[in-house]
Amino acid sequence: MWKQIATLCLVLTGGILVLIYFTSLFSISELVYPKRITAQSLADEEDEAPKVFRKNVLVKKNQYVTPSQLNLEYRDFIVNAGGSFHLNGWYVQQPDNFSAPTVLLLHDWNQSKISMLSMAEALFQLGFHVCLIDMPAHGESSGDKFLLNNSLNDKLKVVVDSLYCLYETNTVSVICSGLSAIPGTELAANDARVQILILQNPIPTVSEIINQQVTDKWNGISFLIKPLAYLKYEQTTGMSADSLNLYVSLKKITKPLLIALTDSTSDRDVWNAISVYDSVATSKKKIWTKNARTFIRSDEDAEKNIYRAMAAFINANIPKESPVIKSRKRIALK
């Protein structure tokens, strides 16, 4: 009898451990293997949706998936980042102003350049050349895993190379959404050609995402799964989640930095913004939020529209002298 009970306990314990192991993998899967969001994938989702839901839930009539739907003339911006590895994007050029500033938009994890279309439209209307890029393993870009490593930094430098190969590029500002703040800040800290950095709703650490994912999915047993989720992330990517944060890079930032918070931000997002603001070395820094927050230690921007605030910050801080580019040989493919 006791042997049977002991055997049953061992089996149950083993089953629970196996369950916890696989749930830890599930918790970090989208962080490492993002869902590819493209115009085709969104169209396929609509085609597969039950007819009863199409009009009300899953089909968004005002969902834009290409710049042309916003009356933006664009061209494909495909960057060869080494071998057969390509980063796919779009480039929208000011037709009558070759001296306009250029902005590079980096989307959040598990999204794509499509999610940056509204920002691209607004900034184009405000007088900027705009480049939107799918991050590695996202959208139409190459890659199987989303790795926040030196290889990603090198690929983003090639994107900047490609932008400066365009004759109209005089300055480049980088706008990062969410987790892209980590590679975007590293790029700005180590590439003098990036003059201005804007972080929209910055997520300062990968650990924060893992904690949130585990808590949202497993709630009461999250304390059991979190350690394994961290271990699984390190095994899958070769990087410790705790080591992936933007605070180290922030200490090297001496160029102007704007932190912009959207209407959907939580109090946690605001505290992240304050932490980022306090960590950055530059004296030219600012937090923008539409809604006044008494605990934000920064003068509130007079501009109430987030995109106009971004444009005003860039225009106010563009250096008088553009960096000297010795070669304008084209790298980006049309």
Image (cartoon, helix red, strand yellow):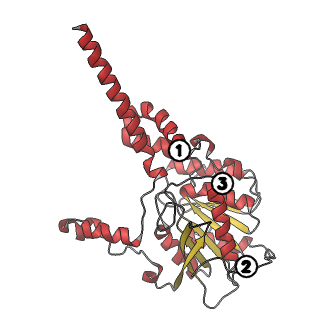
Residue at image location 38% in from the left, 33% down from the top: 20
Q: Position of residue 249 (x, y in %)?
A: 70, 52
Q: Are marks 1 and 2 in contact (CB under 8 Å)?
A: no
Q: Which residue is mark 3?
A: 150
Q: Earlier in the sequence, mark 1 or mark 3?
A: 3
Q: Position of residue 197 (x, y in %)?
A: 67, 63
Q: Is residue 121 above or below residue 56?
A: below
Please name the amino acid that badge 3 sits on. Answer: Asn
**Mark 1–mark 2 distance (CA, rounded to whole Å):** 36 Å
Q: Is residue 299 visible?
A: no
Q: Which residue is mark 1?
A: 208
**Mark 1–mark 3 distance (CA, rounded to whole Å):** 21 Å
Please name the amino acid that badge 2 sits on. Answer: Asn
Residue at image location 65% in from the left, 59% down from the top: 153
**Of residues 7 and 200, the one drawn nearer to the viewer in this rendering:** 7
Q: Earlier in the sequence, mark 2 or mark 3?
A: 3
Q: Nearer the viewer, mark 1 or mark 3?
A: 3
Residue furthest to the left = 52
Q: Which residue is mark 2?
A: 170
Q: Earlier in the sequence, mark 1 or mark 2?
A: 2
SS of the residue under disc 3: helix
Q: Dividing the picture into quarters, in which one does residue 304 lie?
A: bottom right
Q: Position of residue 14 (x, y in %)?
A: 34, 25
Q: Is residue 240 visible?
A: yes
- Quadrant of the image for the N terminus? top left
Please name the amino acid that badge 1 sits on. Answer: Glu
Q: Residues within 10 Å of mark 1 (few under 14, many from 20)?
A: few
Q: Residues within 10 Å of mark 2 (few under 14, many from 20)?
A: some
Residue furthest to the bottom = 96
